[in-house]
Amino acid sequence: MAESMKGLHRSHRCTEVSNKNIGEIVTVMGWVQKSRNKGGIIFVDLRDRSGLLQIIFEEGDVGSEGFAKAERLRSEFVIAVVGRVEARSGAVNENLKTGDIEIRATDIRILSEADTPPFPIEEDSKTKEELRLKYRYLDLRRPDLQKNIILRSKVANLTRQFLTEEGFLEIETPMLTKSTPEGARDYLVPSRVHPGNFYALPQSPQLFKQLLMCSGYDRYFQIAKCFRDEDLRADRQPEFTQIDMELSFVDVDDVLDVNERLLQKMFKESIGVDIPLPIQRMSWAEAMERFGSDKPDLRFGMELKNVSEIVKNCGFGVFTTALENGGSVRGINAEGQAGMPRKKIDAFVDFAKDFGAKGLAYLAINEDGSYKSSFAKFMTEEELDALVKALDGKPGDLLFFAADEDEVVFAVLGNLRLEIAKNLGLLNKNEYKFLWVTEFPLLEYSKEDGRYKAVHHPFTMPMEEDLELLDTQPGKVRAKAYDIVLNGTEIGGGSVRIHQSSIQEKMFEVLGFTKEDAHERFGFLLDAFKYGVPPHAGLAYGLDRLIMLMAQEDSIRDVIAFPKVKDASCLMTEAPNIVDAIQLEELKIAIVEDEEK
Ligand code: ASP
């Protein structure tokens, strides 16, 4: 039978006991990791969220009743132990924080018994993720997950501390609201009181945080749950967490400054990583040109080089056709890879095709300086030499070239660059390379919708020097928008907002919103702007991804206590699920059967 806590007080977590406590009586509580009965003496590894501690039971210390209890212990029983701290009698265990001590038990209570768990509670679990997610409460007992969840709490705490010191106020914004402007599909919540009407769960606190600036709160932050009903990818969650902020009376530099200091504190005080400030900045155009990506991984080089000029009159139709169609020819240098087997090169060519390439040209520079290439026969020796020179090619290097419209060339080489680096083991998880990418395009043309769409959102401020282009070449306008990138992953982004109504109206016009459309969607924000709006700007981090990188995990599910799987369901609670007919009736909702099913 499970015993009570009456009269007991835990004095230490397992690993809070150390050799400094030798001779003291302590009370520890936790789960039995392992119990070994060596006849007359029982060794138990006791586990709590801090780690493991060895307990020793002998009848002479714990009494016959206590010893009988110790004999019954099995994995995951919850126990309380009172005992004396002693130096380890056996060999010291270097792998344990408490490896040089043990507790000689004088009293034990079994607080709870346990069935055999469906998988062992251990670090680096070999158990399939589905099973672990079904029993997430057991999975969460594993030390690696506990470490991540504890790190997450620490980072949230440091964020609160730092932003509060910087004069930010933590303010909550509603979960039951109207559609927000981030452009994904909304999660809807039906209203019982207003049948046929729906709340939307927020995709971000965007509109509310801008309203808070109108209300004079000046500096806001929130660790906010956000919901986006997107087609799910492996690294996405339907609900996720942002560190969200907004500041008044600021421009780009102010936002970047406070955020780099936040990141510096966060990384130093949680995982001991130093971030030298200022963090490097690069315009979007430069990032694309040099890395083929708006979130370049700066842990390695392999930069893109534009060789269009060199090949514009060459005899290789693939190159010249691309140029005639307004595209470009660019290359990267996989240094030292000239000896790459043909099979592997072909695999990279196939990889490039996934990003829209029709093919991928390559040139290997042999150790004797001669070339082996898929296109040498179409080019003169001088042209080949010039290509090699443009890419700083040395004997032993392997060059890849893509020719197409810029967008495709960037996608192909940007991703190929990463794939090669991954293959060559150039991505060191212990290295943290930050980058601000700034001056994003304001608008991008959607062929599908036949109109321009906001790259960030419709409240993002164009760069003042580009305002004139809004009428003539909207696609060329740069925005006061910025992303913070860590090792090739975007961990946050934001913008300066439009606070002049004439610019906002122009923006809506370019986006093809009528006055009515705009009013219908964002009327309250536009109205608020009529009553005195300070210039303001903000940023939001994806907390899940940030923690994933800090914890050096590959999946955001490993840093979320109760994550959902790819199809947006929860394997433990089995949400989403059907509801009682009466609930639907109250909501005046009828389910239409899917005819295909
Ligand atoms: N609301 C934006 C987002 O969720 C971030 C921002 O502009 O502050 O991406």
Image (spheres, rainbow, N blue to C red):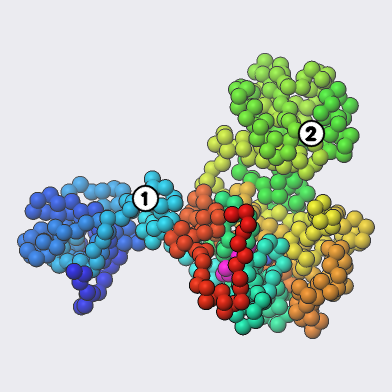
Name the side, left or right, on which 143 lies relative to 58.
right
| Residue occupied by mark 1 | 123
Region rendered in magenta: 223-228
- What kind of element bears circle 2? strand
Examine the structure image and report whether residue 580 is included in the region drawn in magenta: no
Furthest-right residue in view? 472
Name the side, left or right, on which 62 lies relative to 546.
left
| Residue occupied by mark 2 | 403
Return the residue nearer the eye: 194 or 123.
194
Residue for point 81% across, 71% down: 517
- Label number found at residue 250: none
Location of ligand 1 given as a quarter of the image: bottom right
Residue 67 rendering spot, x and y as whole percentages: 11, 61
Q: Quadrant of residue 104?
A: bottom left
The answer for how far apart the CA atoms under marks 2 and 1 are is: 47 Å
Position of residue 83 relative to residue 550, above or below, is below
Mark 2 residue crowding within 10 angstroms, few (<14) / some (14–19) / many (20+): many
Position of residue 187 relative to residue 524, above or below, is above
Return the residue nearer the eye: 319 or 231.
231
Provide the major secondary structure of the magenta segment. Answer: strand
Q: Quadrant of the C terminus?
A: bottom right
Residue 318 rendering spot, x and y as whole percentages: 81, 28
Amino acid at dot 1:
Glu
Amino acid at dot 2:
Ala
Give whichever of discs 2 and 1 has the lower sequence position.
1
Residue for point 74% across, 35% down: 357
